[in-house]
Image (tube, coloured by chain):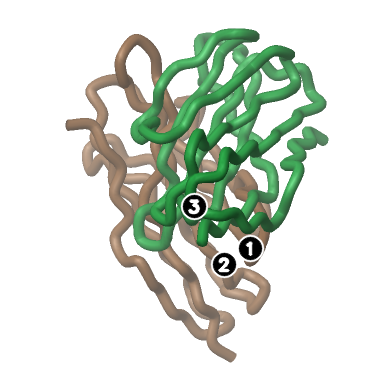
Chain colours: A brown, B green
Amino acid sequence: AQSVTQLGSHVSVSEGALVLLRCNYSSSVPPYLFWYVQYPNQGLQLLLKYTSAATLVKGINGFEAEFKKSETSFHLTKPSAHMSDAAEYFCAVFLLRGSARQLTFGSGTQLTVLP
Amino acid sequence: DVKVTQSSRYLVKRTGEKVFLECVQDMDHENMFWYRQDPGLGLRLIYFSYDVKMKEKGDIPEGYSVSREKKERFSLILESASTNQTSMYLCASSFSGTGRGFSPLHFGNGTRLTVT
């Protein structure tokens, strides 16, 4: 079955430490992949997207993600965490469902940044 | 910037009531979506629409219906609200671009619905 999986529902890092949020997908066709961020009491905001142009994708707020086809992964990273990065992060992939692709979300990872 | 506006941030309704959640986008997007968000479950697609008067079921359409009479407006209807429909509801829209649904979704700020 086609799906998207985020490993770790909660991740805590210290301010200034590396952020690594994991996402794996399963798709029978080349995927279109996205990372979204949700701050408290807000909707989702697009961080970055992969559409096959380059395997390393840079997004807003210093985040980037690398598409690894062999590992079917699209992990999100940031070299140095800031307090303002505390939020929930969602990986999403367009999956073939029925007659068209639909955007399917992972279950989310809550990022806590410790002072 | 794309603006997706949901008419209410917070809503409290009683069991059995008919509930309307409204969503308007201002970027002439063809595609519109309704998701519900629950802790630990991520976002689940309820219904979507690729054109005016067109609708398709998502993963969890039971207990919901939708209406899209105008391109900019997509309404979610709870025919008879139940307590298990207490949730955060998120509307989104996107441009069709090259192929259906390949462009990013733009989200509203959500409506937190409580059914008592």
Q: Image point 64% across, 79% down: which residue?
A: A83
Residue linked to disc 1? A39
Quarter containing the N terminus of chain B: top right
| Disc ID at residue A95 | none
Q: Secondary structure at mark 1?
A: loop
In this rendering, position of residue B107 left or right of residue A2: right
Gap in angstroms between the C-alphas marked 3 and 1: 30 Å
Q: Foreground residue, A24 or B63? A: B63
Instruction: Give the quarter of the image for residue A105.
Output: top left
Q: Foreground residue, B47 or B115? A: B115
| Disc ID at residue B15 | 3
Residue B83: % across, % down: 43, 56
Q: Are there few (<14), some (14-19), or many (20+) residues within 10 Å of tag 2?
A: some
Kind of residue at disc 1: Tyr
In the image, residue B51 sits, relative to residue B107, either above or below, namely: above
In this rendering, position of residue B20 left or right of residue B17: right
Kind of residue at disc 3: Thr
Determine contact: label 1, label 2, CB under 8 Å.
yes
Residue linked to disc 2? A87
Q: Image point 73% across, 49% down: which residue?
A: B8
Q: Image point 26% across, 29% down: which residue?
A: A27
